[in-house]
Image (cartoon, grey):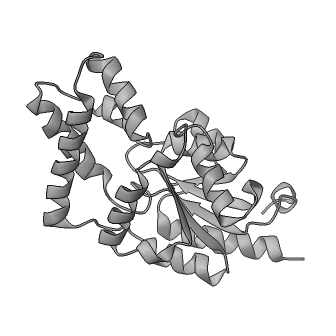
C-alpha cells in the first residue's frame, strides 16, 4: 500500500453486492428475461441485458418502458420473470461464486463487519441468500426497495453503513457492476470491482480502488491491504 492509501481512514466494515458478486445468478436472470419477453413477442439483446445489471426493479422498468413502449405491462412481465427464475432455482439451486467462502473467512479473520447492499428487494434477497446457504453470514442488509434511489445513486450503501453504525469512509465495498461501483464511490466509500458479465467501463475502472479477477484474489487482496495498513 502506498503512502496515500495509508493516510486513509481504517477499514472497519465490508459491504458486498449480491447477484453476480456472491451469487452466480446473472445467467439464470438473463435466461428468464429472454423467455419472459419472448412470451410477449419481445426480444432483448445481450447489450440491453447488460444495461439492467445492478439496477432496482423500478429502474429496470424505466429502461424497459423506454425500449418497448410506455404501455407495456411491466409489472406482469416482471412477475413472470420471477416465476421463471424460481423454476430454475428449484432445479439448480443458487450457486455461490467461486471463492466466496474463502473470502468471507478472510474478512472474519480480520475482525471486519459485514453487510449486504443489493438492488434486489430485501425479502427476495434474503430468500436467495438462504437458498445459497449464506444468509447467516451478515450482520445487516439493505435492499433495493428500501431506498428512494437505486444504484448508481449512493443511497443503498449509505443505508448499509448507517445500519452497521460505521462511517462511509471506513467501509470497503465489493461490487461487480458499473452502477454498483459508481454508487459506492458516490457514497464516499472505497470500492473493489470484481467484474462478472462485463468488463468495467472506463469510468467505473477509474472509480475503483482495484479491479480483481475473482473472490479468491479478493481474499488475498484484503488480507494484504489490512496487513499493510497496520504496519508501522
Count of picture labels = 0
Residue 164 drawn above or below residue 56 = below
Q: Position of residue 219 (x, y in %)?
A: 56, 72
Task: Say whether residue 148 is left or right of residue 85.
Answer: right
Residue 217 visible somewhere in the drawing: yes
Q: Which of the two residues, 230 or 169, is positioned nearer the viewer here?
A: 169
Q: Position of residue 168 (x, y in %)?
A: 73, 55
Q: Position of residue 199 (x, y in %)?
A: 46, 42
Task: Say whether residue 222 is left or right of residue 55.
Answer: right
- Residue 170's quadrant in the figure? bottom right
User: Residue sitting at 46 percent across and 50 percent down?
Assistant: 195
User: Residue sitting at 13 percent across and 39 percent down?
Assistant: 35
Residue 179 drawn above or below residue 134 = above
Which part of the image, by quadrant, shows the N terminus?
A: bottom right
- Residue 136's quadrant in the figure? bottom left
Residue 97 visible somewhere in the drawing: no
Amino acid at each position: 500500500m502506498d503512502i496515500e492509501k495509508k493516510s486513509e481512514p481504517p477499514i472497519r466494515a465490508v459491504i458486498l453486492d449480491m447477484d453476480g458478486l456472491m451469487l452466480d445468478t446473472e445467467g439464470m436472470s438473463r435466461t428468464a428475461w429472454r423467455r419472459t419477453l419472448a412470451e410477449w413477442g419481445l426480444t432483448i439483446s445481450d447489450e440491453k441485458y447488460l444495461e439492467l445489471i445492478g439496477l432496482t426493479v423500478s429502474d429496470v422498468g424505466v429502461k424497459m418502458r423506454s425500449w418497448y413502449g410506455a404501455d407495456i405491462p411491466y409489472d406482469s412481465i416482471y412477475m413472470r420473470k420471477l416465476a421463471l427464475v424460481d423454476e430454475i432455482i428449484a432445479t439448480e439451486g443458487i450457486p455461490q461464486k467461486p471463492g466466496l467462502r474463502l473470502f468471507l473467512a478472510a474478512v472474519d479473520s480480520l475482525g471486519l463487519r459485514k453487510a449486504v447492499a443489493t438492488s434486489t428487494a430485501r425479502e427476495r434477497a434474503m430468500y436467495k441468500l438462504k437458498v445459497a446457504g449464506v444468509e447467516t453470514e451478515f450482520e445487516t442488509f439493505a435492499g433495493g426497495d428500501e431506498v428512494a434511489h437505486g444504484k448508481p445513486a449512493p443511497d443503498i450503501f449509505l443505508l448499509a453503513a448507517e445500519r452497521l453504525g460505521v462511517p462511509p469512509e471506513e467501509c470497503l465495498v465489493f461490487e461487480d457492476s458499473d452502477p454498483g461501483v459508481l454508487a459506492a464511490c458516490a457514497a464516499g466509500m472505497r470500492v473493489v470491482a470484481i467484474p462478472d458479465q462485463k468488463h468495467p467501463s472506463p469510468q467505473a475502472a477509474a472509480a475503483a480502488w482495484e479491479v480483481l479477477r475473482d473472490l479468491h484474489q479478493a481474499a488475498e487482496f484484503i488480507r494484504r491491504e489490512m496487513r499493510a495498513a497496520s504496519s508501522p
